[in-house]
Structures are given as structure tokens and as C-alpha cells.
Image (cartoon, rainbow, N blue to C red):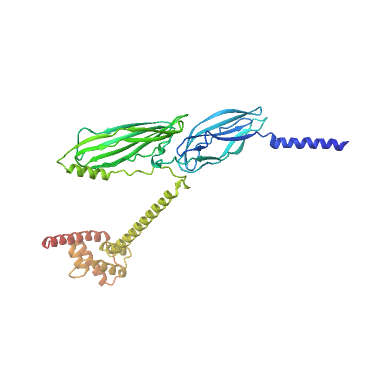
Amino acid sequence: MVVPYVKNILVILFFNLIFQLGWAQATIFSEVTVNKSNVYVGEAVELTIGVYTSTWFTKGVDIGNIKVNGAFSVYFRSVSVTKKIRGKNYAGVQFIYNIFPFENQDIIIPSLNVEVETPKEGDYKGVKRQLKTQEKTLKIKPFPPGIDKSTWMVTNGMTVNEQWIGNTKEVKVGDVIERKITRRASNTVSELIPPILWDSIPSVSLYPSQPSINTNKSKTAISATRTDGVRYLFEEEGTINIPEMEFVWWSPYSKKFLKKTIKGLTINVLANPDLEILKTAKKELTANAFQEEDLKPSKAKTLIFGLSIKEFLILLVLIAITLFILIKMTLKTIRIITHNKEAYKKSEAYAFKQVIKSFDSHDKKLIIPVLYKWLDHYNLEEPTLKALALKSGNNELINEVEEIERQMKLGDSKLLINKELWRKGRKEILKVKKKSVLVNNWINP
């Protein structure tokens, strides 16, 4: 009788353990939905990523914007929702995006790792858990037959405005007239508005200007603006016909092509006797000519320290060049310092410095050789200390030299020398030497 009782207790404990380990956990799941899965290049797709729990979120869920290879992704907003499944309520957060494919191949919306914090059922304390969303594929339709891919565009609607800067009624050879065309398109991004291909016109040079692009987004809608400009340089007199322009786009709502036409313009160009204006204008416009930048989107790039591979390689090259220049400058500086040091050691100033140092020893054997080495820096007719002293014109220095000679005759090994007197005498010798150089330069210019 005891055994069945124990068995029942073990069964109860087992199921209680299972409940504690799994069943008591809050149920969390995700949903990824799109409003359409088969689209053209440039066509907007609304993507919704929902994250749900059977309890509630004790911490805000934040996915942020997402990166999709081959497409632009624009984050709009997040909304709190409640979902009922089989009679049970789930609290959730939906993140809404617009995806704009720009590559003519299927687009993969990647799986995301999302961290949520939600309590177990029957508890209140949040527990961190990881949730993985499912991958989604967008099928890209082929371009309609006969379409010019360079002008392909998808938008719900577009307005086109034109502006002329300059007097188109009075134009002479060498004049420049600027033209700007602004397109405003809904439900797209500025990068997907194609550049204007300007028609070539005989006797007129065209200089496109840098486009101005902008994407505007609210919580529920997105639109884009692109302004293209061109400068017309009129090179010959006569009647110039600027042809009309036609802008075509695909409307996903009406499932057909729509278009907007800008009328052409006729300009009578008058002669201009001052053809230098034409040369100057042509030179200036050529110098400032804008080459259409590669505004087309590219695939997601591999980043190294936040830089693309190309940017990283450029940075490495710049660092290498900088190091090369620094090393070259350092070696040059070392050579200059070494040269100057060697030159200084051969100079009169260095020789005199050694003389002053030797005076501290009072040792005749050290002082006399150093004195005569210093003496060699002066072109004296008689290379003696007395001749040098006489050259200074300083009587005290002359007496000092006579005293040194007297001490040497007496055989003294120690010489008492006045350092300050020699410093003063040197200054006077250098003054005499400088005057001599100036006189020689004046005599022999």
C-alpha cells in the first residue's frame, strides 16, 4: 500500500517540475508579414515584424532599423497590439517598415535576433529571453518589355516643376541660362528617382549641376524630392529649339504607366561681338562641371572598424604615406642635427668653449694645446697668443698673455687664468674680425 502512494507523489513532483521548467514560462513568438511579396524594382513593400508574449513586456522591445541587402529599409513606427489566439490574449509590439528593392533579383529579409524581457505566467519579475524572427523572401518581377531601365521609376504619384534662371527672351552668344527641374514623388525614396538625361542640342554646350535630393518621412507616409539642373551655354547665333521632356513612371495602384510632359522652348540667340565672353564662360563652366555621381544604391558592405573595405584600404594607404613622410622628415632632421653638431664642433665658438673648460683645471698641459687649437680659427700672421691679444686691442688681455708666458718660463705646471677677461677679449677680437670682413667686402664687392 505504501508503494502506490509513493508512486503518486513522484508523478505529482515530476509534472510539477515540468511545469516549473517549461509550462510556467511565458509563451513568446514573432510574426513577419508583408503587404505584397511579388514586386518591381523600386516598388514599396510594407513590412511588419510583430513580437508577442502571453504575459507582458517588463522592458521595451527595440528592433530599430534593419539592413536588407539589395533594398532600402525605412523604419516608420511601432504600435502596441493585442492578439487573441484560441481564446488566449497575447500582448505584442509591431514594428512597421517600408522596403524599397533596388536590385533586379529576389530580396531576402533576414532573420533577426530579438531580446525581450517578460515574466513567467503567474509571476511579475521580468526574465530576459531571446527570440529569432523568420526569414522572408520578396520576389522581384522582371522589367516590362521595351522599358528603358535608366529611367525606370515606381511611385504612387509624381509632380514635375520647371524653373528657368536667366532671361530666355534676350540671349546672346556666350550667355548662360540655367534650368532646374524638380520632381516630387510619393511612396519612394530620393535615391530611386533616376537622374535626368539631358538631350544634346546643336550649337549649345550643356553643363549639368549637382542634383539636390531629399527624402521626407512621417509616421505613416514617405515621399522624395529630386532637383536636377543644367546650364546651357549658347555658342552660335540662330534659332535654338529645346525639345520637350517626358517623365514616365509605373503606378502600382493603377497597374499602368503614367507620364508628365514639359513643353519645349524656342530661343533666338543674337550675335555677340565680344567672343571673349564665350571663351571665359566655357572655361569657367568646364572647370566647375559636375559629373553625375554614383547615387545608385549599393549592396551592404563589409565593414572594418566601421569603414568599408575601400575606405579602410584608403586609410591604410594614407597612414603608410604619413609614416613614410614622418620617417623621411625624421631622418632628414637627424642628418641636419648631426651635420650641425659636427659643424659646431669645428667652429670657433666650440673651440673657445673648450678653452674656458680647460681653465678650470689650471693644468698647463691641458690649457696650452686647447688655446692654440682655438687660435687656429683666426688667420693671424703670427700664430701666437700675444698676436691674438694684440688683435683684440685689450691691454688687460695683453698683460694676461704676458703673465701666462712668464709663468710658463718659470716652469709652473699650474696656470692662474682670468676666464671673464678671456671672454671679454674674445668679444673684442670678433668685433675686429667682423669689421675686417665688412671692409674687405666694401673694397671687393
What percent of the width, then of the height, locates residue 64? 51, 36
What percent of the width, then of the height, locates residue 227? 34, 35
* Residue 356 seen in the figure: no
Q: Nearer the viewer, residue 365 or 131?
A: 131
Q: Quadrant of residue 250?
A: top left
Task: Judge from the rendering whether residue 431 lies leftward or rightward of residue 309; answer left or right.
Answer: left
Q: Which residue extends farthest right? A: 1
Task: Judge from the rendering whether residue 98 lies leftward or rightward of residue 434; answer left or right.
Answer: right
Q: Is residue 165 above or below residue 341?
A: above
Q: Is residue 55 above or below residue 413?
A: above
Q: Is residue 120 above or below residue 235?
A: above
Q: Residue at x 18, y 70 (%)?
A: 382
Q: Quadrant of residue 88?
A: top right
What percent of the width, then of the height, locates residue 76? 48, 32
Q: Is residue 167 above or below residue 333?
A: above
Q: Nearer the viewer, residue 224 or 385?
A: 224
Q: Residue at x 38, y 35 (%)?
A: 248
| Quadrant (top left/top right/bottom left/bottom right) for the C terminus | bottom left
What percent of the width, then of the height, locates residue 167? 22, 33
| Quadrant (top left/top right/bottom left/bottom right) for the N terminus | top right
Q: Which residue extends farthest left? A: 443
Q: Nearer the viewer, residue 116 or 146?
A: 146
